[in-house]
Image (cartoon, helix red, strand yellow):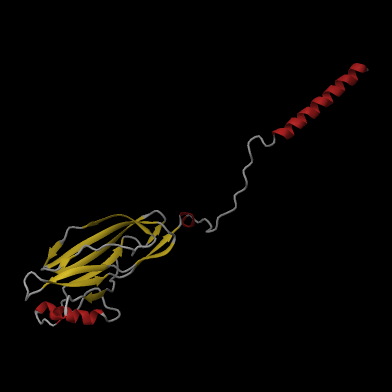
Amino acid sequence: MPKSIPVCIKRIYPNAEIMNKTHRWSGMALAWLLFAVTPGFAETAPGGAPISVKAAVDKTQATVGDIIVYSITAHHDLGVEIVPPSLGNAADGFEPVRNGTGKPQSREGKITGEYWFRLRADRVGPLAIQPIAVHFKIPDAKNPGQKIDGQVLTPRVDVEVRSVLRLQGEPADIRDIKPLTPVGADRPRFLLYGLAAAALCLLGFLGWKSA
């Protein structure tokens, strides 16, 4: 099970008028912002914040060519609209294979949604999936049909990718390969030996004949 992961949250207000609103949603969001900019902010947002996120991978160690599943889980209030996150350039060293969205789960007035990405490890070494912005919209209580924009930053997730050779106990360096010997390279030498033997036999035969 992945451990609790800190998140960073940043509110985005479309204009000064919305910033000055005093309705319930804005008050909660402002308190949320003050805590979010504090270093070490935990996964669960304080003060009944309308959304929290976490990120995880199914395995933190892999070999080149392995597929890992990176997932973002968003837990939010009813009425909060989540924009499906995009991986972008956050997963350098991985090749995206497929992505999708899990079925939202509703419980006690909260919605939990999951967004997953299947990634192929393409490079050896310590890799990281950088923070990804998850954008959302909060209903404006005083202006029906209007929404207030915000975003949550997922935490960085580290993955160690190893080579297949190193996994099998082979040395990390590449050994020198002996040059290949062409087929039939020794044939001229054996041919000379054969001709010399035939000449000796012939000389012996002639000597015996003359005697």
Question: In front: 118, or 16?
Answer: 16
Question: In front: 143, or 4?
Answer: 143
Q: Quick one: quadrant of the C terminus?
A: top right
Judged left or right of residue 89, residue 176 is right
Judged left or right of residue 94, residue 104 is left
x, y percentage for residue 208?
89, 19
In this rendering, the answer to whether 11 lies above or below 101 is below
Judged left or right of residue 186, residue 37 is left
In this rendering, the answer to whether 38 lies above or below 4 is below
Q: Quick one: quadrant of the N terminus?
A: bottom left
The image quadrant of residue 190 is: top right
x, y percentage for residue 191?
74, 30
The residue at the point 21 percent across, 58 percent down is 101
The residue at the point 59 percent across, 49 percent down is 177
x, y percentage for residue 102?
20, 58
The image quadrant of residue 44 is: bottom left
Question: In front: 101, or 163?
Answer: 101
In this rendering, the answer to whether 39 lies above or below 181 is below
